[in-house]
Image (tube, rainbow, N blue to C red):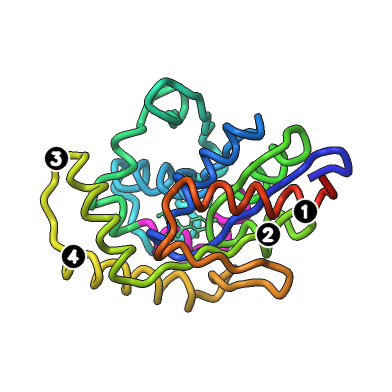
């Protein structure tokens, strides 16, 4: 961020409501929504397509350095393109979801993604969400929020997300998948998921989306003294 841009950074584990909430907060405030997880998913999708081994740090780092990621909006939400190719639905498949934690654990991949994210923060007012936006990408964010929710609630939300994509899965399956991803994201060496001392924790288990959005806007207004 530069001294003139305002940043709301939201981190938290998978399924805590970050994307939906951050997108709506950004819409309401007229800020840009930055889904940092979508960037790691884009690298992962290309890596799988190119059959790059998920342990090959150098090849993954080169891939991350060479790709052009772009976000655009349409009536259904945000679209993600890489090298001018729309991959919005491809980055949400179970294959990408299963591989993304491993890809995003490579320091070289993170370095390139973080540089792109910081560059955006220099230019625009942003609502960013991910795992390290409060700690690494935007340590001086205007507002830092750490979203949590019970694992059962997070798994239920994932089942509904998958249903929308025409895929049937169970709450039990999702609890297992989410637990594995949480452990990996929190236990990795580089930029693990953690709540910073200056983040405000918001538990979304019992909140509606609207309740989450209003809460964050309220916290933001308090921060900027409105
Ligand atoms: O939020 P998501 O499920 O789209 O994120 C996908 C993965 O990307 C997540 O398992 C960890 C990784 N990620 C990350 O390492 N750092 C971020 N800032 C965002 C996501």
Apparent side of residue 33 relative to residue 115 in the rendered image (left or right): left
Q: Give the alpha-carbon distance from disc 4 to disc 3, as whole Å.
A: 16 Å
Q: Earlier in the sequence, mark 4 or mark 3?
A: 3
Q: Position of residue 174 (x, y in %)?
A: 23, 64
Question: Please, what secondary structure does the residue beneath circle 3 have?
Answer: loop
Report which residue position mark 2 lands on. 144
What segment is highlighted magenta in the picture? 100-112
Label 4 sits on a secondary structure element that is helix
- Relative to the observer, which residue lies in front, 62 or 206? 206
The relative height of residue 204 versus residue 196 in the rendered view (above or below) is above
x, y (%) of residue 86? 38, 25
Task: Determine which of the numbered discs, if any, sits on residue 76 in the image.
Answer: none
User: Which numbered tag is attached to residue 166?
Assistant: 3
Task: Compare residues 70 and 49 and report the one nearer the observer.
Answer: 70
Q: Is residue 36 magenta?
A: no
Q: What percent of the width, then of the height, locates residue 62?
A: 52, 47
Q: Earlier in the sequence, mark 2 or mark 4?
A: 2
Say left or right for 4 vs 149.
right
Task: Specify the farthest residue to the left.
Answer: 168
Quadrant where the N terminus sits is top right
- The answer to whether mark 2 and mark 4 are in CB contact below 8 A is no
Q: Main secondary structure of the magenta part?
A: helix
Which residue was labeled with disc 4? Answer: 171
List the residue tagged with mark 1. 222
Discs 3, 2 touching: Cβ within 8 Å: no
Report how far apart the C-alphas of labels 3 and 2 lie in the structure.
Answer: 34 Å
């Amino acid at each position: 961020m530069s001294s003139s841009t305002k940043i709301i950074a939201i981190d938290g584990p998978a399924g805590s409501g970050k994307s939906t909430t951050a997108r709506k907060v950004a819409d309401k405030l007229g800020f840009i929504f930055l889904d940092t997880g979508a960037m790691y998913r884009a690298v992962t999708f290309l890596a799988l397509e190119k059959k790059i081994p998920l342990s090959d740090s150098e090849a993954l780092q080169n891939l991350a350095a060479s790709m052009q990621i772009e976000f655009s909006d349409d009536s259904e939400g945000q679209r993600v393109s890489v090298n001018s190719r729309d991959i919005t639905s491809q980055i949400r498949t179970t294959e990408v979801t299963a591989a993304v934690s491993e890809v995003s654990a490579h320091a070289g991949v993170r370095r390139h993604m973080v540089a792109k994210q910081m560059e955006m923060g220099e230019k625009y007012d942003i609502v960013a969400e991910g795992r390290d936006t409060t700690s690494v990408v935007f340590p001086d964010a205007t507002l830092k929020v750490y979203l949590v929710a019970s694992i059962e609630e997070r798994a239920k939300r994932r089942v509904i997300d998958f249903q929308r994509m025409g895929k049937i899965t169970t709450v039990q399956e999702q609890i297992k998948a989410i637990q594995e991803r949480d452990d990996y994201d929190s236990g990795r060496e580089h930029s693990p998921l953690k709540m910073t001392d200056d983040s405000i924790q918001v538990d979304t288990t019992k909140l509606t989306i609207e309740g989450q959005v209003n809460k964050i806007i309220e916290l933001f207004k308090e921060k900027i003294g409105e």
